[in-house]
Image: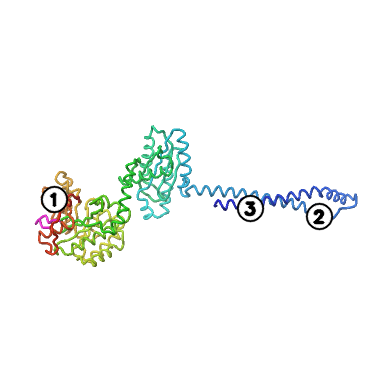
Amino acid sequence: MSELNVNRSRTANARNDIITGGIVLAALVMFVGTGSQAVSNIIDTLTGVGGGADRTLSVALLLNVALILFGYRRYRDLSKEVSEHAEAEQRAQSLASLDPLTGFYNRRGIADEGTALIERSFRRQKSVAMLMFDLDHFKNVNDVHGHVVGDALLKTVAAEILRLLPSAALSSRLGGDEFACLFAYDKSAPAAVEEIAEAVVARLAEPFDADGVHVHISVSCGIAKSEEDCTEIENLMRRADIAMYSAKREGRNRWSWFDTSMEHELRTRNALESAMRTGIPRGEFVPYFEQQIDLTTGRLHGFEMLARWNHPTQGLILPDDFIPIAEETGMIADLSMAVMRLAFIEARNWDAALTLSVNISPTQLKDPWLSQKIVKLLTETNFPATRLEVEITESSLFENLALAQSTVSSLKNQGIRLSLDDFGTGYSSLAHLRALPFDRIKIDKSFVMSIIDNSESAAIVNAITRLGDSLGLPVTAEGIETQKIEERLRQLGCHKGQGWSYGRPTSVETTRRLLAERNLLPTSRVTPHVASDDDDLRESA
């Protein structure tokens, strides 16, 4: 009920009370003036004494009585209405401040109550801690088991959080799977706050039974405290939220205190995100190329395309700084297609024996139109599909294997080859090899780089190589940085590799000169050497 409607209702009730009161008062006055005489006449009539009842006075008496009864009944009805309105107002205020699913405060409620808690704690020389909890991968629960199970899980999680918090704590569900809790604590004992956060994180990592379904989840927690420069509830919530997302970036299933460096990182990230939104259509993201070598002959077999950002003021920015942002914001598809377009245009005039490998992100693989988009790009750039190899990581196959199968089959039908990237780091590699028609296996560089000093890595590389041979799948080893690693791979039967031992990823211009020197590029495509390659050689893979 809005405040305007409540005021209108109160005005109407007051007006009705005045009218009813006036009627009752008039009836009482008339009764006092005529009632005694009328009663006397009626008694005389009944006893036979006097001259009999005055008809007019009798009627007046009956009307007075009727008015009094009407007034009393109306008064009783109005009193009931007032009581119901008061209860309705109280319910409306309660609903406006509480989350109906968990019974916790909502965002509005926690803001009001939290402000009061901070003020009380400040007077008592105490601090207030805010713990922000966000369930990790909760969307998967709704997608796999449905919203009924998701809601049941949220109610159970809320009960567990409430059980582990101090009795005087304020608890809130801010929306979705995000919770916020506040409580006062002694400034000299922050460890007490950490113990509570640790207890909640540990409990939520255990299995839950939600509407008869066994569910495994975890939670990321951010902690902020009231300070001289943070006395408002909104600022406290913002800091706790920043700390919570920091905990997610560090691996989830953990808690993290807020510090000012996180705020600086957030501003930097937001600035990069904004620059990316304008930089992608401007063509600031460009392809770099890493050589892929035949380990038996030493011949250049092809290149893997990697993305770089030619920032107008910051210079060359590496993928580790912008790919996570592109994934989180959904810009990865546009970025990838823009860089692929430039790479296809450049590589279409290379020697016909050279292949080009491109990575497809997990986010892109969720797009049911991905294969059509790639084929359209090949057509527009006139790049042969048979020279393209699309690399898919194992981790991207977990969420929707059926969609991945459809996409892979569509690409294969166009003559595009498929490679399973980072092989050995997933959970069901053999199942993926059987379910999807891959043409190549790529061994993750974490195994290759430690093959000399780590016997387990050597055993894994050897097993993958033998598996590839038995399945008729060529194997490429990533991360070859020394001649010793190359020789060891050759001994194990690995026939193709890439890594810094053959040169770091290079720009279009540098790659073009490299191909010209090896007679793998038409002479008309050669670009004069106008600058040093030192800048290119500083880049990491």
| Residue identified by numbered label 2 | 59
Residue 536, labelled with which disc? none
Camera-side residue: 210 or 125? 125
For the residue marked with disc 1, what is the amino acid? Ser
Element on which disc 2 rests = helix
Q: What's the CA distance linking mark 1 and mark 2?
A: 118 Å
**Magenta stretch contains residue 251:** no
For the residue marked with disc 2, what is the amino acid? Val
Q: Nearer the viewer, mark 1 or mark 3?
A: 3
Element on which disc 3 rests = helix
Using the image, determine if residue 259 lies above or below residue 442.
Answer: above
Labelled pair 1, 3 in contact (Cβ < 8 Å): no
User: Which label's residue is closer to the chain start, 2 or 3?
Assistant: 3
Q: Left or right? Give the position of 167 relative to 7.
A: left
Q: What's the CA distance linking mark 1 and mark 3?
A: 87 Å
Q: Residue 51 in the image: x percent, y percent?
A: 90, 52
Segment colored magenta = 292-300
Query: How is the model colour-coded?
Result: rainbow
Residue 501, labelled with which disc? 1
Residue 12, labelled with which disc? 3
Camera-side residue: 112 or 444? 112
User: Which label's residue is closer to the chain start, 1 or 3?
Assistant: 3
Binning the other alpha carbons within 10 Å of mark 3 as few (below 14), some (14 to 19) or many (20 upward) gives few
Q: Quadrant of residue 147?
A: bottom left
For the residue marked with disc 3, what is the amino acid? Ala
Q: Residue 26 in the image: x percent, y percent?
A: 75, 50
Camera-side residue: 182 or 151? 182
| Residue 462 can be seen in this image | no
| Residue 415 can be seen in this image | yes
Q: Nearer the viewer, mark 1 or mark 2?
A: 1
Q: What's the CA distance linking mark 2 and mark 3?
A: 33 Å
